[in-house]
Image (spheres, rainbow, N blue to C red):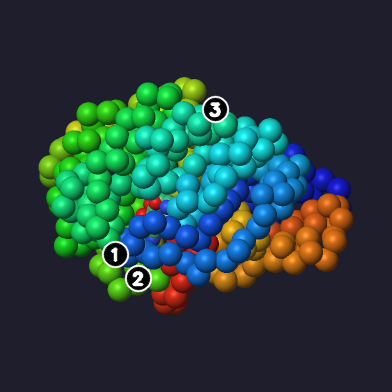
Amino acid sequence: MTDGEAGIAGIRDSFGRTHTYLRLSVTEACNYRCQYCGPGVVHRGLSDDHVVLLCSLFRSMGIRTLRITGGEPTVRPGLIPLIVRLSSLGFERLALTTNGTSLVRDARALRKAGIQSVNVSLDAVDADLYASLTGGFPVRPVLEGIGAALSEGLAVKLNAVLLADTYRSQVRQLMDFAGKFGIPLRFIELMPFGDGARCEGVSTATLVAFLGEEYGEEASVCPPQGLGANSVSKGDEPWGSGPAEYRRFGGVDVGLIGALTSCFCSRCQRLRLTNEGWLKTCLYHSDHLNLSELLDRGCSQDEMRGRIADFVLTKRLRHAFQSGPVEWPLSSVGG
Ligand code: SAM
């Protein structure tokens, strides 16, 4: 690597993709037991000091957006003080992906710590359906948590995964809820990870046909209304270069993430740092660089930057879901 190959513009791979976005998993543990997911093998994981050190390296290499995820990130002890430290590193956008169970308690502290936006996973609004999808959990605290996050001024997006047996009810409930609160609603195609490989998902094409019949499509707005001009999501998961294609149905900005049926790898700008300290360039492929080991070996920061840049150059062109499922659940990589 020469100076400038990895710089403030982001980290480039051999296909010219520039990486400015890092998903940081802070735990593989999760309090939920969703039908299509499951907790990953829980490792002791990186210490707070190592998380901060690695994130500062990535920041110096041009990563602009840091999204904290898991597992369920809010079950990591000491998450808020860790976010305060991450926030001081100067990322342009600091975001969190959560199942929302702790938002009533934590929304204010998260905002004060520096979180600007939260993506809340919400697969249903009806209490019974939600419980059956999540392994018995109540939906009410999550709905209240979304309200708390909005009251704090956090930008909120909803993420939902649909299952073939229940998708019609899921979609109707979620559209009502998202419409009432003016929140963008994103549907993520089920990917064959872990238990997800044994469930039947819903393709984006099927979903779009259903949305069209039920609600009718309106001219889309760019950016989606819930992600106004000050949106912290711009450049993060935008309507241009990110995975979601935004369309408008029934007054709701609907993000379609065709993770399986429409490959967006050619636009992928993401890197992932697992709780174990592995850098991954793709959700699917198992290729990784063990940064934890490099830290333990006492590598200098320059050496680490060089290893990271070289590893990103090996990023593959695209996923290979068509070759078969992946045995680990998404929660072990940082979904
Ligand atoms: N616990 C947090 C949450 O619930 O948002 C963060 C981690 S969770 C793994 C992140 C997202 O991945 C959730 O929206 C979840 O529904 C989604 N997910 C999990 N397994 C999936 C799969 N096999 N295919 C598609 N999405 C999946």
Task: Give x and y (percent) for residue 93.
Answer: 58, 34
Q: Residues within 10 Å of mark 1 (few under 14, many from 20)?
A: some
Name which of mark 3 and mark 2 comes first in the sequence: 3
Q: Is residue 114 above or below residue 51?
A: above
Alpha-carbon distance for marks 3 and 1?
A: 34 Å
Task: Give x and y (percent) for residue 195.
Answer: 35, 71
80 with respect to 246 (left or right): right
- Say which of 136 and 330 sits in front: 136
- Say which of 204 and 37 sits in front: 37
Q: Are marks 1 and 2 in contact (CB under 8 Å)?
A: yes
Name which of mark 1 and mark 2 comes first in the sequence: 1
Residue 52 is labelled as none
- Say which of 245 and 62 sits in front: 62
Disc 1: which residue:
35
Q: Secondary structure at mark 3?
A: helix
- Say which of 100 and 62 sits in front: 100
Disc 3: which residue:
112
Q: Are marks 3 and 1 in contact (CB under 8 Å)?
A: no
Residue at the image point whose x is 44% and y is 75% from the top: 327
Q: Is residue 208 above or below residue 38?
A: above
Alpha-carbon distance for marks 3 and 2?
A: 36 Å
Q: Residues within 10 Å of mark 2 (few under 14, many from 20)?
A: some
- Amino acid, disc 1: Gln
Residue 195 is labelled as 2
Mark 3 or 2: the one toward you: 3
Look at the numbered disc 2 and say if its residue's Cβ is closer than 8 Å to ligand 1.
Answer: yes
Count of numbered circles in the view: 3
Q: Quadrant of the N terminus?
A: bottom right
Residue at the image point whose x is 71% and y is 53% from the top: 50
- Amino acid, disc 2: Asp
